[in-house]
Image (tube, rainbow, N blue to C red):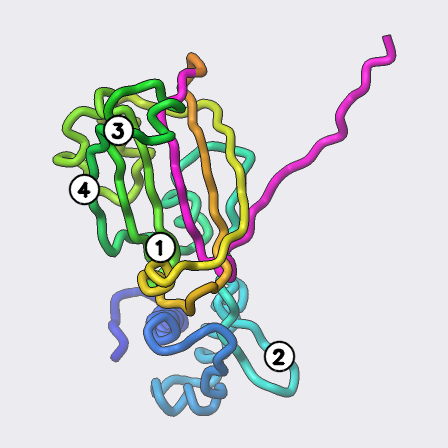
Amino acid sequence: MFNKNGIPLYVQLKNMLLKDIRENYKPNDIIPAEFELEKIYNVSRITVRRSIEELVKEGILVKKQGKGTFVKEQKILYDANSIGSLTQRLKKQNHHLSTASIEFEIITGDHMVKELLSCDTLLCIKRFRLLDDVPFALMLNYFDINSVPTLQKKFKVESLYTFLKNEYALEFFSAEETVSAKAASKEEAKKLDIKEKHPLLSLHRLSRDRNDKPMEFSDILIKADMYKHKIMLSHEKVSTT
């Protein structure tokens, strides 16, 4: 079960427990007690305790006095004060964002985003994203098709913004974002494996390049119980002159 590869035993056990939690447990489920885990994995109580402590530090588990150890509800923290790849941000928070499905649509007819991007033809990237293998978000990213030629043939990575920077030298320097709440439609609920009318957060973002030209519009739906939006506020200085 365990490898003699120089990796500490508690780390190997932690990784096994994390895999088991992601595949077989839901938020607020209780995991087996330490003495049970000791028997299941044939390791010492000290190893079990160290592994559990690491998972508690990482926000995967939470201990409740007199009740046991539970799977913690996983909410990602999104810092809305900077522009960057959601994939890379989540990686720093020890989360893995993956793509379950992707579609590309070329839009030539009427569409509100055309006016925002001042273009005649749009390329829309439609992605169904998983957070740690759990249905998480439905993402639509719109571009002037002329700014990202043949993107649909080249794009095969998880981080869209990193790809745009590397492939097209396209980097965003400012953005306007609005956040609102909505109830999941029947189709959205089916894709995200939730009940119809489950609360979703709707994010609309218009991103601009260094010359303040609108380059991308995103329309994102995220399960509200998996997401926290962080916004920094500061005191506005009032002129006395």
What amino acid is labelled 1 in the image? Answer: His
Pointer 2 with pointer 1, Cβ within 8 A: no
The quadrant of the rendering that contains the N terminus is: bottom left
Estimate how packed mark 1 is, as few (under 14), some (14 to 19) or many (20 or more) residues with alpha carbons within 10 Å.
some
Marks 3/2: CA distance?
51 Å
Estimate how packed mark 2 is, as few (under 14), some (14 to 19) or many (20 or more) residues with alpha carbons within 10 Å.
few
Residue 121 occupies which quadrant of the picture?
top left
Q: Which mark is residue 64?
A: 2
Label 4's element? loop
Disc nearest the viewer among 1 and 4: 4
Q: Which mark is residue 96?
A: 1
Tell me where residue 124 appears, x and y as whole percent.
Answer: 26, 36
From this viewpoint, which residue is outermost toward the top? 241
Disc nearest the viewer among 3 and 1: 3
Q: Earlier in the sequence, mark 4 or mark 2?
A: 2
Label 1's element? loop
Pointer 3 with pointer 1, Cβ within 8 A: no
Task: Establish if 158 lies above or below 82.
Answer: below
Q: Judge whether residue 50 can be spotted in this image.
A: no
Pointer 1 with pointer 4, Cβ within 8 A: no
Label 2's element? strand
Residue placed at 27% from the left, 76% from the top?
2
Estimate how packed mark 3 is, as few (under 14), some (14 to 19) or many (20 or more) residues with alpha carbons within 10 Å.
many
Marks 4/3: CA distance?
20 Å
Tell me where residue 141 appears, x and y as whole percent.
Answer: 33, 37
Which stretch is magenta?
213-241
In this rendering, would 184 be left or right of 24? right
Of 158 and 33, nearer the camera is 158
What amino acid is labelled 4 in the image? Answer: Lys
Q: Which residue is mark 3?
A: 122
Residue placed at 33% from the left, 34% from the top?
161
